[in-house]
């Protein structure tokens, strides 16, 4: 397998780190990058030594959107028949938690990539927006749906229809991001969150992500039923015995990872 050109893939103990690396175009998301990000995510997802994943960009840009130069000449036929956007859909099937560490621009596809992650941590200078309308198009990898579920209809309409961007504080107030930290602390904070998650009972982490995601699909009754089945299943794991035994005996739990 060739080494990636558009991203840097690293491991930090039980955390997989993916750094988007097309600095000349503010990490514009081209089709090669899509394939490379998906391959890196699939690799980490299949690796029992990895418990959580961080995706980040550069201080100036998480990603300034789909690569407009690459898209400019595309036709309906290309998008429809070549399934140009398919790799992005597949990110939603990754079972391990993905944290987006966002600094600078997260625009268009960049904002949508952050929304495809499970937790967004932003630096104080992060900017989020869906400016596609200015290019004569609209969000294409889930923005109209995931942004709306994250921040509600009115603000989603505002961003999608006007193309304006919002800063980290407004994104935090709207529920788009989980935490805002000084730029200098961004990667460290994201890695700490990932290390925390990666140390827990791995099947419970996978079940928890699956259960929360269920809140975005189907009915409340269906989601509650799914949560109940997963909750019961957690009692089939070694980590549940360890976690509860440790609590009862007033010691720190040690979760075993294969
Ligand atoms: N695509 C290609 N190149 C880009 C992109 C982009 N999205 N964004 C920036 N660049 C390039 C610029 O062309 C420039 O290149 P060069 O130095 O060769 O001229 C370089 O990056 C630096 O950018 P600027 O000089 O423009 O930097 P500024 O600080 O002046 O401005 C901005 C920064 C405001 C971010 C500005 O670059 C900008 O507006 N970029 C485009 C933002 C945008 O419209 N994004 C949405 C794209 S459409 C989209 O994402 C569709 C989503 C659905 C499909 C998803 C598939 C992944």
Image (cartoon, rainbow, N blue to C red):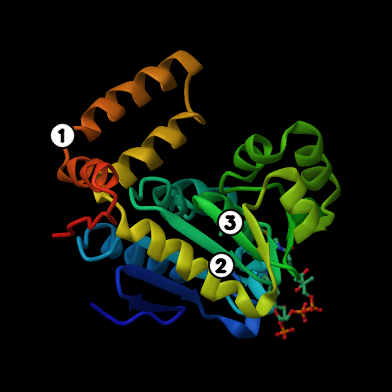
Question: Which-is-in-front pick, marks 1 and 2?
Answer: 1
Task: Spot the residue most to the bottom.
Answer: 24
Q: Which residue is mark 2?
A: 29
Q: Earlier in the sequence, mark 1 or mark 3?
A: 3
Q: Earlier in the sequence, mark 1 or mark 2?
A: 2
Left or right, 253 with reference to 127 = left
Q: Which residue is depicted at the point 27% across and 54% down?
A: 251
Q: Which residue is depicted at the point 72% across and 52% down?
A: 172
Tag 2 secondary structure: loop
Out of 246 and 7, give the one closest to the viewer: 246
User: Residue 129: where, in percent of width, then height?
Assistant: 75, 56
Is label 1 within 8 A of ligand 1 (CB to nearest ligand atom)? no
Tag 3 secondary structure: strand
Calculate the distance from the C-alpha at mark 2 to the C-alpha at mark 3: 18 Å
Calculate the distance from the C-alpha at mark 1 to the C-alpha at mark 2: 41 Å
Q: Which residue is mark 1?
A: 236
Task: Spot the residue most to the top.
Answer: 221
Q: Which residue is depicted at the point 61% across and 58% down?
A: 109
Left or right, 230 with reference to 136 = left
- Mark 2: few, some, or many residues within 10 Å (few <14, many ≥20)? many
Q: Which residue is mark 3?
A: 120
* Placement of 198 over or under 118, stated as above or below: below
Is label 2 within 8 A of ligand 1 (CB to nearest ligand atom)? yes
Left or right, 226 with reference to 23 = left
Left or right, 23 with reference to 209 = right
């Amino acid at each position: 397998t060739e080494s990636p050109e558009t991203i840097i893939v690293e491991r930090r103990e039980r955390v997989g780190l993916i750094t988007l690396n097309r600095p000349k175009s503010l990490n514009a998301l081209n089709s090669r990058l899509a394939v490379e990000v998906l391959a890196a995510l699939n690799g980490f997802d299949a690796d029992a030594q990895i418990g959580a994943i961080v995706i980040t960009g550069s201080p100036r840009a998480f990603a300034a959107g789909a690569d407009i130069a690459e898209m400019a000449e595309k036709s309906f036929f290309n998008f429809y028949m070549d399934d140009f956007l398919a790799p992005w859909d597949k990110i939603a099937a990754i079972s391990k938690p993905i944290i987006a560490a966002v600094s600078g621009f997260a625009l268009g596809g960049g904002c949508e990539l952050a929304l495809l992650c499970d937790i967004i941590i932003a630096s104080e200078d992060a900017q989020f927006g869906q400016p596609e309308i200015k290019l004569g198009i609209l969000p294409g990898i889930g923005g109209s749906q995931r942004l709306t579920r994250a921040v509600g209809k009115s603000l989603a309409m505002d961003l999608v229809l006007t193309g304006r961007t919002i800063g980290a504080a407004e994104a935090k107030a709207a529920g788009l991001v989980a935490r805002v930290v000084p730029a200098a602390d961004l990667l460290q904070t994201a890695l700490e969150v990932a290390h925390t998650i990666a140390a827990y009972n791995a099947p419970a982490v996978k079940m928890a992500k699956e259960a929360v995601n269920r809140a975005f699909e189907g009915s409340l009754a269906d989601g509650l039923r799914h949560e109940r089945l997963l909750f019961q299943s957690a009692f089939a794991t070694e980590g549940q015995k360890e976690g509860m035994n440790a609590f009862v005996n007033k010691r720190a739990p040690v979760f075993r990872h294969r």
